Image: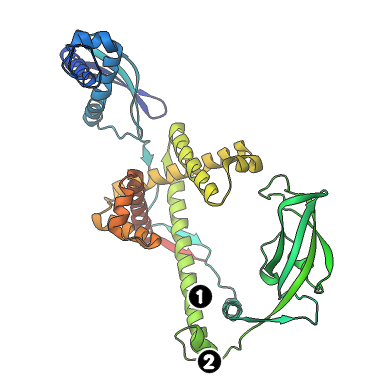
Amino acid sequence: METKIEKLPENVVKVDIDIPAKDAVDFYNNAAKRLAQYVNIPGFRKGKAPRNIVEQNIGTERIKHEALEGALPRIFSQVIKENDFDVVAQPYVESYTYNIGEDLKITAKIELRPEVTLGEYKNMTVDVEGYKTPEDAQQKSIEGLLEQHASTIVVTDRNTKDTDIVVFDFEGFSHGEKIEHGDAKNYTLDLAHSSFIPGFAEQLVDRPLGEDFEINVTFPAEYHEKKLAGQPAVFKCKINEIKSKVLPELNDEFAQKVGPFKTVDDLKADIQSYLDKQKEDIDRTNSEKAIFEKVVSNAKVDIQQSMIDREADQLLDEYKQKLQMQGFTWDQAVEAQGYDNIMSSLKEDAAVRVKNSLVIDKIAKEENITVSQEDFGAKLAELSRIYQIDTNTMIKQLSNTPGVFNALSQQALNEKVTAFLAENNKVNLK
């Protein structure tokens, strides 16, 4: 086999391949034998018809196509190995000339990994804004605990307060038309923690029991149902029940109830320990992110558009799956956000992800950072804990999706490179 290599723009090489006529005939004959196994030819058992009869029944072009499909993986593998190509996509045939008795001539294109030129990535000092725990964080944590363990009592002698839980009926209208799924009977709503339309819960405050009233709201401009986005609405309401929250007393007995604590001071100390750990984790995450962003900005790489497009396609699939999990459709997303806006955002994210990945791989190569069996096993164990499935069952389930294994391996490599960068650079927390 002889090859001629020509470098093209966008990190692509054109490869002209000459296969000796003898090898080309062998490819053809083997393909004819394979196809004969699946073709019913009158007068012959499957696989026993001579080549000329097989050609008459299925045609020489189909045999050539089968021959190429069988031979190309080995041919490309040899070309890649001989030229030490670092490929990022499946090679593809641009043209070929296949005449029996003559050399087989193939012109193919192979897309290569872009060359990454690393800038400074070690022994740097990076300024990072330190996380500041809010001064009232401990108090709010305690209030949250008290809220979680609150009891309720039904009240009948006053109007609603903004801390109450109400049970009410409502029916919504927009421009005189009833809103689909915009009504309910005896709906329970915590007025202090409402996820309703902005302004809805606030207008349920200071309302009496049993009286009909109306509230006016405007749907957010980004509301998922485009027909209602930014539109005014009227809701007819009636309060059926008012429940007042009764918070427990903050004392040693409460502390013992909510955890392995003896006193309120023990509870407060535990909360403070959690807040300190939270600050430490946030500072570490922000530091790792800042270091990596600095390393990426220092690196130079000429990324071909085809890599970004493939990554964008993958992000699009992930986005559609996320929409489905949230109960939305792709058509709804396009209607709300616009196709061009979605794709533009995805391609921007794709460009960042591709560059990040290339820089990580380059650093791993330069520093001889690899993913061991133990590293991969740890990622599998982490996944099995998340989904509460034992590791062996997880492996069996993932065996049909090898892409997941590649993603886990890449994730493990990302983490090791991130750890390396954190160890070899300094952070100035400001």
Q: Residue 368: image x %, image y %?
A: 26, 50
Relative to 236, residue 174 above or below: above
Relative to 305, residue 242 above or below: below
Report whether 72 appears left or right of 417: left
Name the secondary structure under disc 1. Answer: helix
Q: At x 61% / y 89%, what residue is drawn?
A: 249
The quarter of the picture where residue 314 lies is top left
Whether residue 98 is visible to the viewer of this picture, yes or no, is no
Q: Residue 146: image x %, image y %?
A: 59, 81
Label of residue 275 in the image: 1
Label of residue 396 in the image: none
The quarter of the picture where residue 88 lies is top left
Q: Which residue is mark 2?
A: 252
Relative to 74, residue 331 above or below: below
Label 2 crowding class (10 Å Cα cut-off): few <14, some 14-19, many 20+? some
Q: Say how many tags the image has.
A: 2
Q: Earlier in the sequence, mark 2 or mark 1?
A: 2
Report whether 426 appears left or right of 134: left
Quarter of the picture holding the N terminus: top left
Q: Residue 24: image x %, image y %?
A: 20, 15
Q: CA distance from mark 2 to mark 1?
A: 21 Å
Q: Nearer the viewer, residue 346 or 146?
A: 146
Whether residue 317 is visible to the viewer of this picture, yes or no, is yes
Q: Residue 299: image x %, image y %?
A: 42, 44
Q: At x 55% / y 47%, what residue is drawn?
A: 323
